[in-house]
Image: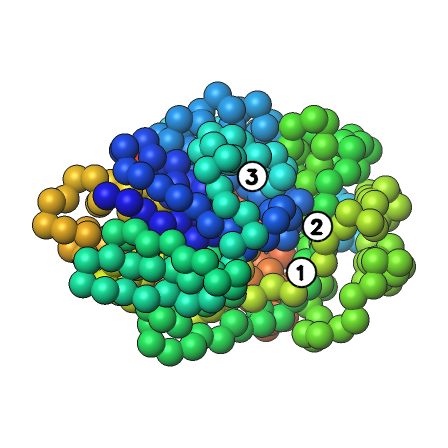
Amino acid sequence: MKAVVIGGGIGGACAAIALKRFGIETAVYEAVKEIKPVGAAISIWPNGVKCLNYLGMKDALRELGGNMRFMAYKEYQQGQTMTRFSMDPLIQCVGEQPYPVARAELQSMLLDTYGRDQVQFGKRVTHVEESADSVTAWFDDGTSATGDVLIAADGTHSIIRQHVLGYATERRYAGYVNWNGLVEIDESIAPADQWTTFVGEGKRVSLMPVSGNRFYFFFDVPLPKGLPQDRTTVRDDLQGYFAGWAEPVQKLISQIDPQTTNRVEIHDIEPFMQLVKGRIALLGDSGHSTTPDIGQGGCAAMEDAVVLANMLQTNSLGIEDALLRYQEKRAYRVKDLVLKARKRCDVTHGKEMAVTEQWYEDLKTETGERILSGMCETILGGPLE
Ligand code: FAD
Protein backbone atom coordinates (compact mmCIF):
# COMPACT_ATOMS: atom_id res chain seq x y z
CA MET A 1 0.00 0.00 0.00
CA LYS A 2 1.27 3.48 -0.81
CA ALA A 3 -0.01 6.54 1.05
CA VAL A 4 0.29 10.05 -0.33
CA VAL A 5 0.27 12.54 2.57
CA ILE A 6 -0.53 16.15 1.74
CA GLY A 7 0.83 18.65 4.30
CA GLY A 8 3.85 18.29 6.55
CA GLY A 9 2.43 20.04 9.65
CA ILE A 10 1.56 18.29 12.90
CA GLY A 11 -1.18 16.16 11.34
CA GLY A 12 0.62 15.17 8.15
CA ALA A 13 3.90 14.43 9.93
CA CYS A 14 2.18 12.30 12.61
CA ALA A 15 0.19 10.41 9.97
CA ALA A 16 3.34 9.74 7.96
CA ILE A 17 5.21 8.53 11.06
CA ALA A 18 2.30 6.28 12.07
CA LEU A 19 1.90 4.74 8.61
CA LYS A 20 5.62 4.25 8.21
CA ARG A 21 5.80 2.42 11.54
CA PHE A 22 3.30 -0.09 10.15
CA GLY A 23 5.46 -0.58 7.09
CA ILE A 24 3.15 1.35 4.79
CA GLU A 25 5.02 3.21 2.04
CA THR A 26 4.52 6.96 2.45
CA ALA A 27 5.46 10.17 0.69
CA VAL A 28 4.78 13.62 2.15
CA TYR A 29 4.15 16.66 -0.06
CA GLU A 30 4.31 20.05 1.61
CA ALA A 31 3.34 23.33 -0.09
CA VAL A 32 5.93 25.63 1.44
CA LYS A 33 9.72 25.48 1.15
CA GLU A 34 10.11 25.90 4.91
CA ILE A 35 7.37 25.27 7.47
CA LYS A 36 6.80 28.30 9.71
CA PRO A 37 4.11 27.40 12.26
CA VAL A 38 1.49 30.11 13.00
CA GLY A 39 2.07 30.00 16.74
CA ALA A 40 5.10 30.10 19.00
CA ALA A 41 4.21 27.10 21.13
CA ILE A 42 1.50 24.57 21.80
CA SER A 43 0.27 22.72 24.84
CA ILE A 44 0.18 19.01 24.17
CA TRP A 45 -2.35 17.50 26.56
CA PRO A 46 -1.92 13.89 27.74
CA ASN A 47 -4.16 12.50 24.98
CA GLY A 48 -1.76 14.01 22.43
CA VAL A 49 1.30 13.05 24.47
CA LYS A 50 0.13 9.42 24.50
CA CYS A 51 -0.14 9.49 20.71
CA LEU A 52 3.42 10.81 20.42
CA ASN A 53 4.58 8.18 22.94
CA TYR A 54 2.84 5.53 20.86
CA LEU A 55 4.60 6.83 17.76
CA GLY A 56 8.01 6.44 19.42
CA MET A 57 8.72 10.02 20.53
CA LYS A 58 8.40 9.58 24.30
CA ASP A 59 11.95 10.61 25.20
CA ALA A 60 12.30 13.29 22.53
CA LEU A 61 9.09 14.99 23.69
CA ARG A 62 10.22 15.08 27.31
CA GLU A 63 13.32 17.00 26.25
CA LEU A 64 11.12 19.71 24.72
CA GLY A 65 8.32 19.89 27.27
CA GLY A 66 8.00 22.52 29.96
CA ASN A 67 7.53 21.60 33.58
CA MET A 68 3.89 22.60 34.18
CA ARG A 69 2.99 21.38 37.70
CA PHE A 70 0.47 24.01 38.80
CA MET A 71 -2.33 26.06 37.32
CA ALA A 72 -3.47 29.50 38.53
CA TYR A 73 -5.93 32.22 37.59
CA LYS A 74 -5.27 35.80 38.61
CA GLU A 75 -7.52 38.80 38.80
CA TYR A 76 -6.45 41.39 36.23
CA GLN A 77 -6.11 44.65 38.16
CA GLN A 78 -4.15 43.69 41.27
CA GLY A 79 -2.86 40.34 40.04
CA GLN A 80 -4.37 38.63 43.10
CA THR A 81 -4.66 34.86 42.90
CA MET A 82 -8.25 33.73 42.34
CA THR A 83 -7.34 30.04 42.41
CA ARG A 84 -4.17 27.96 42.32
CA PHE A 85 -3.91 24.18 42.31
CA SER A 86 -1.65 21.29 41.46
CA MET A 87 -2.07 19.49 38.15
CA ASP A 88 -1.16 16.19 39.80
CA PRO A 89 -4.80 15.00 40.13
CA LEU A 90 -5.15 15.38 36.36
CA ILE A 91 -1.96 13.42 35.74
CA GLN A 92 -3.15 10.72 38.14
CA CYS A 93 -6.54 10.61 36.44
CA VAL A 94 -5.23 10.16 32.89
CA GLY A 95 -1.83 8.51 33.44
CA GLU A 96 0.35 11.01 31.62
CA GLN A 97 1.34 14.65 31.96
CA PRO A 98 0.85 17.58 29.60
CA TYR A 99 3.81 19.08 27.78
CA PRO A 100 3.84 22.65 26.52
CA VAL A 101 6.45 22.81 23.70
CA ALA A 102 7.84 25.39 21.30
CA ARG A 103 6.24 24.75 17.91
CA ALA A 104 9.40 24.97 15.86
CA GLU A 105 10.97 22.31 18.09
CA LEU A 106 7.90 20.08 17.88
CA GLN A 107 7.91 20.42 14.11
CA SER A 108 11.61 19.52 13.98
CA MET A 109 11.10 16.51 16.20
CA LEU A 110 8.28 15.24 13.97
CA LEU A 111 10.21 15.75 10.73
CA ASP A 112 13.37 14.19 12.17
CA THR A 113 11.38 11.19 13.40
CA TYR A 114 9.77 10.72 10.01
CA GLY A 115 12.84 11.58 7.92
CA ARG A 116 13.15 15.11 6.52
CA ASP A 117 14.53 13.80 3.25
CA GLN A 118 11.27 11.98 2.61
CA VAL A 119 9.29 15.22 2.61
CA GLN A 120 9.00 16.99 -0.70
CA PHE A 121 8.79 20.71 -0.02
CA GLY A 122 7.42 23.31 -2.46
CA LYS A 123 4.66 20.93 -3.64
CA ARG A 124 1.31 22.71 -3.42
CA VAL A 125 -1.68 20.54 -4.29
CA THR A 126 -4.15 22.16 -6.66
CA HIS A 127 -6.61 19.28 -7.03
CA VAL A 128 -7.04 15.55 -6.56
CA GLU A 129 -8.46 12.83 -8.80
CA GLU A 130 -9.68 9.35 -7.91
CA SER A 131 -9.95 6.25 -10.02
CA ALA A 132 -11.27 2.81 -9.09
CA ASP A 133 -7.94 1.68 -7.65
CA SER A 134 -5.82 4.78 -7.02
CA VAL A 135 -5.82 8.45 -6.10
CA THR A 136 -3.67 11.22 -7.57
CA ALA A 137 -2.70 14.64 -6.25
CA TRP A 138 -1.76 17.33 -8.75
CA PHE A 139 0.69 20.05 -7.77
CA ASP A 140 1.02 23.64 -8.96
CA ASP A 141 4.32 22.85 -10.68
CA GLY A 142 2.45 20.48 -13.01
CA THR A 143 3.74 17.29 -11.38
CA SER A 144 1.58 14.69 -9.65
CA ALA A 145 1.77 11.88 -7.09
CA THR A 146 -0.31 8.71 -7.13
CA GLY A 147 -1.03 6.30 -4.31
CA ASP A 148 -3.59 3.85 -2.98
CA VAL A 149 -4.75 6.26 -0.28
CA LEU A 150 -4.43 10.03 0.17
CA ILE A 151 -4.25 11.73 3.56
CA ALA A 152 -5.33 15.36 3.29
CA ALA A 153 -3.53 17.09 6.16
CA ASP A 154 -3.50 20.43 4.37
CA GLY A 155 -4.69 22.48 7.32
CA THR A 156 -7.58 24.80 8.03
CA HIS A 157 -7.54 26.34 4.53
CA SER A 158 -7.59 22.84 2.99
CA ILE A 159 -8.41 22.72 -0.69
CA ILE A 160 -9.02 18.97 -0.55
CA ARG A 161 -11.83 19.44 1.99
CA GLN A 162 -14.17 20.71 -0.71
CA HIS A 163 -13.47 17.66 -2.86
CA VAL A 164 -14.37 15.40 0.05
CA LEU A 165 -17.48 17.27 1.22
CA GLY A 166 -18.74 18.39 -2.16
CA TYR A 167 -19.25 21.92 -0.89
CA ALA A 168 -17.13 24.79 0.43
CA THR A 169 -16.96 25.44 4.16
CA GLU A 170 -16.53 28.85 5.71
CA ARG A 171 -14.22 29.71 8.54
CA ARG A 172 -16.11 31.41 11.37
CA TYR A 173 -14.41 34.32 13.17
CA ALA A 174 -14.49 33.52 16.89
CA GLY A 175 -14.44 37.19 17.90
CA TYR A 176 -10.97 37.61 19.32
CA VAL A 177 -7.36 38.23 18.37
CA ASN A 178 -4.50 36.24 19.92
CA TRP A 179 -0.90 37.45 20.18
CA ASN A 180 1.63 34.79 21.10
CA GLY A 181 5.36 34.31 21.46
CA LEU A 182 8.21 33.11 23.64
CA VAL A 183 10.03 35.07 26.32
CA GLU A 184 12.70 34.19 28.88
CA ILE A 185 11.21 33.05 32.20
CA ASP A 186 10.98 35.86 34.73
CA GLU A 187 9.61 34.66 38.07
CA SER A 188 8.51 38.16 39.00
CA ILE A 189 5.90 37.73 36.23
CA ALA A 190 4.83 34.15 37.04
CA PRO A 191 6.27 31.00 38.67
CA ALA A 192 8.38 28.85 36.34
CA ASP A 193 6.38 25.66 36.97
CA GLN A 194 2.90 27.06 36.59
CA TRP A 195 0.36 27.79 33.87
CA THR A 196 -0.67 31.28 34.94
CA THR A 197 -3.61 33.17 33.45
CA PHE A 198 -4.69 36.75 34.22
CA VAL A 199 -8.38 37.30 33.40
CA GLY A 200 -10.66 40.33 33.22
CA GLU A 201 -12.76 42.40 30.77
CA GLY A 202 -13.25 39.31 28.56
CA LYS A 203 -9.50 39.32 27.88
CA ARG A 204 -6.74 37.06 29.11
CA VAL A 205 -2.97 36.94 29.44
CA SER A 206 -1.42 33.52 29.85
CA LEU A 207 2.03 32.07 30.49
CA MET A 208 3.13 28.44 30.21
CA PRO A 209 6.65 27.09 30.74
CA VAL A 210 8.42 25.40 27.81
CA SER A 211 11.96 23.98 27.83
CA GLY A 212 15.02 26.23 27.64
CA ASN A 213 13.88 28.52 30.48
CA ARG A 214 11.16 30.10 28.34
CA PHE A 215 7.54 31.06 28.81
CA TYR A 216 5.04 30.61 26.00
CA PHE A 217 2.88 33.70 26.40
CA PHE A 218 -0.36 34.71 24.80
CA PHE A 219 -2.72 37.67 24.98
CA ASP A 220 -6.39 37.39 23.90
CA VAL A 221 -8.48 40.48 23.14
CA PRO A 222 -12.06 40.48 21.76
CA LEU A 223 -11.83 42.69 18.65
CA PRO A 224 -13.45 43.10 15.25
CA LYS A 225 -11.94 41.11 12.41
CA GLY A 226 -9.66 42.72 9.86
CA LEU A 227 -7.92 45.43 11.91
CA PRO A 228 -4.52 46.39 10.45
CA GLN A 229 -1.54 44.30 11.61
CA ASP A 230 1.66 46.16 12.23
CA ARG A 231 4.62 44.72 14.13
CA THR A 232 5.95 48.17 14.95
CA THR A 233 2.87 48.92 17.09
CA VAL A 234 2.49 45.56 18.88
CA ARG A 235 3.81 46.83 22.20
CA ASP A 236 1.74 50.03 22.08
CA ASP A 237 -1.34 48.08 21.03
CA LEU A 238 -0.99 45.65 23.94
CA GLN A 239 -0.27 48.47 26.38
CA GLY A 240 -3.51 50.09 25.23
CA TYR A 241 -5.61 46.93 25.44
CA PHE A 242 -4.17 46.04 28.84
CA ALA A 243 -4.06 49.52 30.40
CA GLY A 244 -4.75 49.26 34.12
CA TRP A 245 -3.79 45.56 34.27
CA ALA A 246 -1.48 44.30 37.02
CA GLU A 247 2.26 44.94 37.09
CA PRO A 248 3.32 41.44 35.89
CA VAL A 249 1.25 41.95 32.72
CA GLN A 250 2.90 45.33 32.08
CA LYS A 251 6.27 43.75 32.66
CA LEU A 252 5.51 40.94 30.22
CA ILE A 253 4.47 43.46 27.55
CA SER A 254 7.75 45.33 28.05
CA GLN A 255 9.76 42.09 27.67
CA ILE A 256 8.20 40.61 24.53
CA ASP A 257 9.97 40.82 21.19
CA PRO A 258 7.52 42.42 18.71
CA GLN A 259 9.50 40.93 15.80
CA THR A 260 8.71 37.38 16.89
CA THR A 261 5.25 37.96 18.35
CA ASN A 262 2.51 36.42 16.21
CA ARG A 263 -0.92 37.97 15.79
CA VAL A 264 -3.75 35.58 14.88
CA GLU A 265 -7.45 36.25 14.30
CA ILE A 266 -9.04 33.13 15.79
CA HIS A 267 -11.45 31.07 13.70
CA ASP A 268 -13.11 27.70 13.68
CA ILE A 269 -15.29 25.78 11.22
CA GLU A 270 -18.75 24.41 11.93
CA PRO A 271 -18.14 20.68 12.57
CA PHE A 272 -19.12 18.24 9.81
CA MET A 273 -19.41 14.47 10.04
CA GLN A 274 -17.91 13.46 6.72
CA LEU A 275 -14.17 12.99 6.99
CA VAL A 276 -13.55 10.63 4.08
CA LYS A 277 -14.50 10.08 0.46
CA GLY A 278 -13.39 6.94 -1.35
CA ARG A 279 -9.63 6.71 -0.89
CA ILE A 280 -9.19 10.20 0.62
CA ALA A 281 -9.21 11.04 4.32
CA LEU A 282 -9.22 14.48 5.93
CA LEU A 283 -6.91 14.62 8.94
CA GLY A 284 -6.14 17.41 11.43
CA ASP A 285 -7.41 20.94 10.78
CA SER A 286 -8.63 20.03 7.30
CA GLY A 287 -11.22 17.79 8.97
CA HIS A 288 -11.91 19.85 12.08
CA SER A 289 -10.80 23.41 12.72
CA THR A 290 -11.17 24.55 16.28
CA THR A 291 -10.46 27.64 18.32
CA PRO A 292 -7.46 27.00 20.58
CA ASP A 293 -9.50 27.50 23.77
CA ILE A 294 -9.03 23.97 25.11
CA GLY A 295 -5.67 23.45 23.38
CA GLN A 296 -6.86 20.39 21.50
CA GLY A 297 -6.53 21.10 17.76
CA GLY A 298 -3.03 19.68 17.40
CA CYS A 299 -3.76 16.88 19.89
CA ALA A 300 -6.78 15.88 17.81
CA ALA A 301 -4.57 15.73 14.70
CA MET A 302 -2.24 13.36 16.60
CA GLU A 303 -5.24 11.23 17.59
CA ASP A 304 -6.46 11.18 13.97
CA ALA A 305 -3.05 9.95 12.82
CA VAL A 306 -2.97 7.06 15.29
CA VAL A 307 -6.53 5.98 14.52
CA LEU A 308 -6.15 6.24 10.75
CA ALA A 309 -2.95 4.21 10.70
CA ASN A 310 -4.52 1.59 12.99
CA MET A 311 -7.57 1.31 10.75
CA LEU A 312 -5.46 0.88 7.64
CA GLN A 313 -3.26 -1.68 9.37
CA THR A 314 -5.80 -3.79 11.20
CA ASN A 315 -8.66 -4.10 8.69
CA SER A 316 -8.62 -6.20 5.58
CA LEU A 317 -11.78 -5.23 3.72
CA GLY A 318 -9.95 -2.65 1.67
CA ILE A 319 -8.92 0.98 1.94
CA GLU A 320 -12.36 2.51 1.52
CA ASP A 321 -13.71 0.35 4.34
CA ALA A 322 -10.78 1.24 6.61
CA LEU A 323 -11.34 4.95 5.96
CA LEU A 324 -15.04 4.66 6.80
CA ARG A 325 -14.05 3.01 10.09
CA TYR A 326 -11.67 5.94 10.72
CA GLN A 327 -14.53 8.36 10.10
CA GLU A 328 -16.79 6.40 12.42
CA LYS A 329 -14.22 6.56 15.22
CA ARG A 330 -13.31 10.22 14.75
CA ALA A 331 -16.32 12.26 13.64
CA TYR A 332 -18.09 12.55 17.02
CA ARG A 333 -14.86 12.96 18.95
CA VAL A 334 -13.63 15.88 16.87
CA LYS A 335 -17.05 17.53 16.73
CA ASP A 336 -17.17 17.37 20.51
CA LEU A 337 -13.73 18.99 20.80
CA VAL A 338 -14.62 21.83 18.41
CA LEU A 339 -17.89 22.58 20.23
CA LYS A 340 -16.29 22.36 23.69
CA ALA A 341 -13.62 24.82 22.58
CA ARG A 342 -16.24 27.16 21.14
CA LYS A 343 -18.18 27.12 24.41
CA ARG A 344 -15.03 27.87 26.42
CA CYS A 345 -14.10 30.55 23.93
CA ASP A 346 -17.40 32.37 24.42
CA VAL A 347 -17.19 32.26 28.22
CA THR A 348 -13.55 33.36 28.31
CA HIS A 349 -13.96 36.18 25.80
CA GLY A 350 -17.11 37.86 27.07
CA LYS A 351 -19.60 36.89 24.39
CA GLU A 352 -22.19 37.46 27.12
CA MET A 353 -20.40 39.53 29.70
CA ALA A 354 -22.71 38.44 32.55
CA VAL A 355 -21.70 34.81 31.95
CA THR A 356 -18.03 35.76 31.87
CA GLU A 357 -18.38 37.77 35.11
CA GLN A 358 -20.00 34.74 36.74
CA TRP A 359 -17.06 32.60 35.61
CA TYR A 360 -14.67 35.08 37.26
CA GLU A 361 -16.72 34.73 40.46
CA ASP A 362 -16.67 30.93 40.21
CA LEU A 363 -12.88 30.95 39.84
CA LYS A 364 -12.60 32.49 43.31
CA THR A 365 -14.10 29.33 44.83
CA GLU A 366 -12.48 26.86 42.44
CA THR A 367 -10.38 24.19 44.14
CA GLY A 368 -9.19 22.73 40.87
CA GLU A 369 -11.65 19.87 41.05
CA ARG A 370 -14.14 21.20 38.48
CA ILE A 371 -11.52 22.42 36.03
CA LEU A 372 -9.41 19.29 36.21
CA SER A 373 -12.36 16.93 35.97
CA GLY A 374 -13.47 18.69 32.76
CA MET A 375 -9.97 18.33 31.35
CA CYS A 376 -9.80 14.72 32.46
CA GLU A 377 -13.02 13.88 30.66
CA THR A 378 -11.80 15.50 27.44
CA ILE A 379 -8.46 13.70 27.60
CA LEU A 380 -10.00 10.31 28.36
CA GLY A 381 -12.03 10.60 25.16
CA GLY A 382 -8.82 10.00 23.19
CA PRO A 383 -8.09 6.77 21.31
CA LEU A 384 -5.37 5.38 23.59
CA GLU A 385 -7.41 5.09 26.77
P1 FAD B 1 -1.27 22.73 9.87
O1 FAD B 1 -0.40 22.78 11.05
O2 FAD B 1 -1.90 24.00 9.41
O3 FAD B 1 -0.44 22.09 8.68
C1 FAD B 1 -0.94 22.02 7.38
C2 FAD B 1 0.23 21.93 6.44
O4 FAD B 1 -0.25 21.72 5.12
C3 FAD B 1 1.06 23.21 6.40
O5 FAD B 1 2.42 22.90 6.56
C4 FAD B 1 0.74 23.80 5.04
O6 FAD B 1 1.83 24.53 4.49
C5 FAD B 1 0.42 22.56 4.23
N1 FAD B 1 -0.48 22.83 3.10
C6 FAD B 1 -1.55 23.66 3.08
N2 FAD B 1 -2.13 23.66 1.86
C7 FAD B 1 -1.42 22.78 1.12
C8 FAD B 1 -1.52 22.35 -0.23
N3 FAD B 1 -2.49 22.81 -1.06
N4 FAD B 1 -0.62 21.44 -0.71
C9 FAD B 1 0.37 20.95 0.12
N5 FAD B 1 0.51 21.35 1.42
C10 FAD B 1 -0.37 22.25 1.90
N6 FAD B 1 -3.48 22.79 19.37
C11 FAD B 1 -3.17 22.08 20.47
O7 FAD B 1 -3.26 20.85 20.47
N7 FAD B 1 -2.72 22.72 21.61
C12 FAD B 1 -2.56 24.07 21.66
O8 FAD B 1 -2.14 24.62 22.68
C13 FAD B 1 -2.89 24.84 20.51
N8 FAD B 1 -2.75 26.18 20.52
C14 FAD B 1 -3.05 26.90 19.41
C15 FAD B 1 -2.90 28.28 19.44
C16 FAD B 1 -3.22 29.05 18.33
C17 FAD B 1 -3.07 30.55 18.38
C18 FAD B 1 -3.69 28.40 17.16
C19 FAD B 1 -4.04 29.20 15.92
C20 FAD B 1 -3.84 27.02 17.11
C21 FAD B 1 -3.53 26.26 18.24
N9 FAD B 1 -3.66 24.86 18.23
C22 FAD B 1 -3.36 24.14 19.35
C23 FAD B 1 -4.18 24.15 17.04
C24 FAD B 1 -3.06 23.55 16.20
O9 FAD B 1 -2.13 24.54 15.86
C25 FAD B 1 -3.62 22.94 14.93
O10 FAD B 1 -4.74 22.16 15.24
C26 FAD B 1 -2.58 22.09 14.23
O11 FAD B 1 -1.50 22.88 13.82
C27 FAD B 1 -3.20 21.38 13.04
O12 FAD B 1 -2.23 20.66 12.34
P2 FAD B 1 -2.44 20.31 10.82
O13 FAD B 1 -1.26 19.51 10.42
O14 FAD B 1 -3.79 19.75 10.63
O15 FAD B 1 -2.47 21.71 10.08
Question: For residue 236, which quarter of the picture?
Answer: bottom right
Q: Along the horizontal axis of the image, is 286 left or right of 100? A: left
Measured from the top left, where is residue 241 in percent x and y? Answer: 81, 63
In the image, the residue with mark 1 has its CB under 8 Å from the nearest atom of ligand 1? yes
* Residue closest to the eye, 140 or 381: 140
Quickly name the residue at label 3.
107
- Residue at x 49%, y 75% (from the top left corner): 170
Quickly name the residue at label 1.
264
Mark 3, secondary structure of its residue: helix
- Residue at x 70%, y 26% (from the top left corner): 212
Task: Tell me how far mark 1 sits from mark 2, CA to CA.
Answer: 8 Å
* Mark 3 in CB contact with mark 1 (< 8 angstroms): no
Quarter of the picture containing the N terminus is top left
Mark 1, secondary structure of its residue: strand
In the image, the residue with mark 2 has its CB under 8 Å from the nearest atom of ligand 1? yes
- Which of discs 3 and 1 lies nearer the camera? The answer is 3
- Three-letter amino acid code at the position of disc 1: Val
- When the figure is inspected, residue 244 is found, relative to residue 254, above or below; the finding is below
Quickly name the residue at label 2.
180
Which comes before the other along the chain, label 2 or label 3? 3
| Outermost residue to the left | 317
